[in-house]
Amino acid sequence: MTTAPPSVDLSVEAALFVRDHGGKLFIWTQRQVCCKGRTSSRTQTSFEAPPHRSFVRVFSWEQVELYLAAGLAPAEITVAVRSFPRRRVIAFWPNCMHQ
């Protein structure tokens, strides 16, 4: 069974930022445990694929490509630029926070 690619809400600012940093954005999740022992998933992004992970291209537009870690299947992804504490690209979807 194949899953449909996610819908992507990519801000213009994020698209330009990704393009200016090589044109590829890799997105994966990392599980974290909070102080009360609950676990949550937070997204991580990078302009280079981290080692020991497999990725699938889920979006391509102009000179921008988004890659999602294999096994993740969100229905939608939001990609934006956050400027504090440093300028970076963030990605998130319902029930998964960004770092």
Image: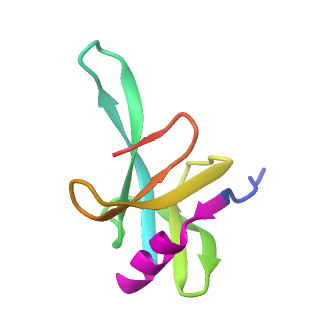
Q: Is residue 31 visible?
A: yes
Residue 44 rendering spot, x and y as whole percentages: 36, 52
Total count of labels: 0
Q: Quadrant of residue 51?
A: bottom left
Residue 61 rendering spot, x and y as whole percentages: 62, 80
Please tell me which residue lies in front, 18 or 45: 18
**Residue depicted at x 43% and y 53%:** 28
**Residue depicted at x 33% and y 59%:** 52
Residue 85 rendering spot, x and y as whole percentages: 21, 54
Please tell me which residue lies in front, 51 or 62: 62
Q: Is residue 22 visible?
A: no
Whether residue 44 sits left or right of residue 94 in the image: it is: left
Magenta run includes residue 81: no
**Residue depicted at x 46% and y 80%:** 16
Q: Quadrant of residue 94?
A: top right
**Residue depicted at x 39% and y 59%:** 53
Give the main secondary structure, helix, strand or loop, of the magenta stretch. Answer: helix
Q: Which residues are magenta?
A: 8-21
Whether residue 15 sits left or right of residue 85 in the image: it is: right
Residue 14 rendering spot, x and y as whole percentages: 46, 70
Q: Quadrant of residue 57?
A: bottom right
